[in-house]
Amino acid sequence: MKELINAFKKNKLALFSLLFILLIIAAAIFAPFIVPYNPDKINVNAILLPPSFSHWLGTDQLGRDVFSRLIYGSRISIEVGFIAVSISLFIGVIIGAFSGYYSGLIDSLLMRFVDIMLTFPSFFLILAISAILKPSIINIMIIIGLTSWMGVARIVRAEFIQNRQKDYVLAAKASGASDSYIIFSEILPNCIAPILVSATLGIAGAILIQASLAFLGIGIMPPTPSWGGMLSRGKTYIMIAWWLTLFPGIAILMTVLSFNLMGEAVRDALDPRINNSLK
Amino acid sequence: MVPYIFKRLMFMLPILIGITLISFFVIHLAPGNPLTEQLGLNPKVSMGSRLQLEKLYGLNKPLISQYINWIKRITTLNFGRSFTANHEPVIKEISRTIGITILINSLAIIFIFLFSIPIGVISAVKQNSLFDKISTVIVFIGFAAPTFWVALLLIIFFGINLHWLPIGGITSLNYRFLSPAGKIINISKHLVMPVFVAGFGGIAGLSRYLRSNMLEVYKSEYITTARAKGLKEYVVIYKHALKNALIPFITILGLSVPGLIGGSVIIETIFDINGMGRLFYQSVLARDYPTIMGILVIGAVLTLLGNLIADVAYAVVDPRLRK
């Protein structure tokens, strides 16, 4: 933890990313107190207005305030990012841990399963499942989680293989601790760093996938504001209203960029190999 | 070399079976069966003829024998008929659209190769230079920018404002009247933006990857040796360092194939290209399960082929693997 704080102190970009993420999360939580207009309020007198003092980021085809909709849109992105990644961490950690701890047949079977899942173009798989299930936002989170745990599984497995033969594990075994105790209470806490890194990067990935799906009109019911959905609507007015395309895209870009930069910073801070090479 | 390729093919067989199992399972999550989709609530269809049809489709059999039957059919590339109005065989729909998808993705891979190698090499050789810093920033933005947004911005800028490039389709309206050379130029112009959008994320990732590989290789002893021998710096860079840094790079390039194929859904939809990605999207909206299942399998097989090509290329560059 101390390394982390130090890293953020030294790395200005990472600190800035962290602040931006906190800002977005705050915007998502306190949206009703921030927005100047009701995001769903239709105003026929203010259709497709360019950015101005009264509407900072302009208005859309129904006269709704783009800034207010962007603020509310952060809710979907943040929710999807955190929930989808929680699901993928849950699956990835369990599969990776069992695979790495037990090795042998269990390991080969689970890793073949990972190989198979990685062979599908994941966006195809996500679209196919969302065609079958009702594509509500909850289902979208579950689907993204179900199709993005493979990287985590591989990382956790590698960590478990490294730790399996270490003295503290052998000592726990000798003292008669159960396998599940060793896996979850002894080895897993030692793998937190790489899991944290892939979680941060995973949130960025999930936000991007959800935005793509919303852009294709899947998973978001209008008038719920979402960044991908706003871009999808804005596409129709691309010739006359550039602000409908530019701003939601910047919101996605900045959020994803911040999570990526933070993930990188955490990795640099916690990876002993990189630390040594710098010294 | 041949035994090596054979070994790789054998390794792919269980994965191929797994792919079909998952595709089959995913589609059977679907409510109803093909008959309810095709016959709907048509009152003219009696219970008796419904049962007869069920027998014909094998829907009365246990799931496992349905799966085996389906496998038997897809080995002859028979994916059934689409649920859409014209009931075209799925394989016909796929073969009509797959060409342009493969073309765009192959061009994108070439584009990724052409740009990520020099960017990666220069930023490693001139580590912490201005070029390195600027390319790092661009790489991170490239990672984070949604492809569909980049596509829209390009359309606004190059298509609408500057009128340099066409914004959709792969041929112009006057295509039929152009000379052969004019036709090629016309298609190329249409492909510039889709190929760029398909490739830019890959360039970001791979140039970054190559950069850290190069930096790693630089520390190894044979590079010091090569320098000590008095070899010119560009020989050290291109003959010794790059060759070794490229080895893992090829695998990563192979691994990016599923992402490229998945991305064609967005690219073909935005640029109005009649490819397999857009066909998949339309099938998803129409819940056309035979087509979805067919493209799911074909997409995964394409990925496997991409991996096989990467494996073979890997063996060509790294003789240790051929044994």
Image: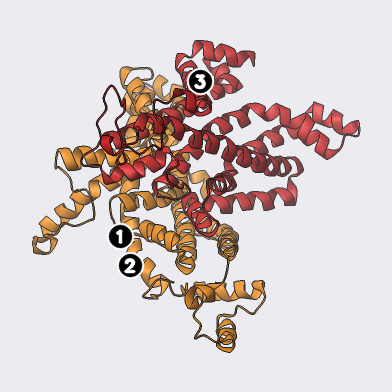
Chain colours: A red, B orange
Q: Which residue is drawn at 64% across and 16% down?
A: A1
For the residues carrying marks 1 and 2, which lies nearer the camera in this image? 1
- Dot 3, how many residues are within 10 Å of its Cα: few (below 14), some (14-19), or many (20+)? some
Residue at x-position 50% and y-position 11%: A10
Instruction: Residue under label 2, please give it.
Output: B96
Q: What residue type is labelled 1?
A: Asn
C-alpha span from label 1 to label 2: 9 Å
- Compared across the picture, whether B24 is left or right of A183 comes to left
Q: Mark 2 lies on which chain?
A: B
Question: Are labels 1 and 2 assigned to the same chain?
Answer: yes
Q: Is residue B18 above or below residue B239?
A: below
Q: Which mark is residue A18?
A: 3
Instruction: Report if the CB atoms under discs 1 and 2 are less than 8 Å apart.
Output: yes
**SS at mark 1?**
loop
What amino acid type is highlighted by mark number 3? Leu
Residue at the (57%, 62%) spot, across then down: B13
